[in-house]
């Protein structure tokens, strides 16, 4: 009888110990994203002003070559957060497209919002 009580007590302590373990801190071991410096946003439109949705805008760090991509929304707009650096921007062109207007290179600092990085595409 005494052996059963000891076994039951040990089992109970093991269960409680395991349950308490699950309530501990959770450690995220995944790779952390690069610190965000600022935001670049703009629109992609046709020469006539129509928004061009589903176009890929690529933001390229001029020093490191790191690239960031985002797709335009139904309104032709895009927004992307990037680390502080100097960037050039490119937009996806499709059969017969030509750039009528492309934004200049931009320097993004912590907290910046460069919101006029607009593209115009003609045929």
Image (cartoon, rainbow, N blue to C red):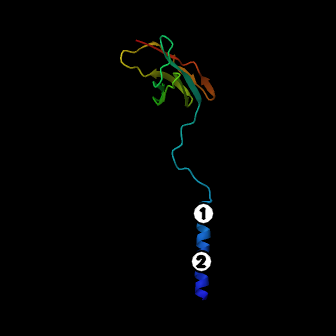
Residue at 62 percent of width and 59 percent of height: 24
> Is 24 located above or below residue 69 in the figure?
below
Name the foreground residue: 8 vs 34. Answer: 8
Q: Are marks 1 and 2 in contact (CB under 8 Å)?
A: no
Residue at 60 percent of width and 82 percent of height: 6
Residue at 49 percent of width and 22 percent of height: 88
Task: Say whether residue 54 is visible.
Answer: yes
Q: Which residue is outermost to the left? A: 95
Q: Secondary structure at mark 1?
A: helix
Which quadrant of the structure image shows residue 13? Answer: bottom right
| Mark linked to residue 21 | 1
Q: Secondary structure at mark 2?
A: helix
Which quadrant of the structure image shows residue 23? Answer: bottom right
Mark 1 vs 2, N-terminal side: 2
In percent of width and height, residue 114 lies at 59, 22
> Is 8 located above or below residue 88 in the figure?
below
């Amino acid at each position: 009888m005494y052996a059963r009580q000891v076994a039951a007590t040990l089992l109970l302590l093991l269960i409680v110990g395991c349950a308490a373990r699950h309530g501990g801190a959770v450690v995220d071991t995944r790779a952390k994203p690069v610190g965000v410096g600022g935001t670049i946003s703009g629109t992609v439109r046709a020469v006539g002003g129509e928004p061009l949705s589903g176009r890929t805008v690529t933001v390229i760090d001029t020093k490191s070559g790191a690239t960031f991509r985002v797709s335009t929304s139904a309104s032709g707009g895009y927004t992307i957060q990037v680390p502080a650096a100097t960037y050039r921007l490119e937009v996806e062109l499709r059969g017969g497209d030509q750039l009528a207007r492309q934004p200049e290179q931009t320097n993004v600092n912590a907290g910046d919002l460069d919101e006029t990085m607009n593209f115009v595409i003609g045929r």
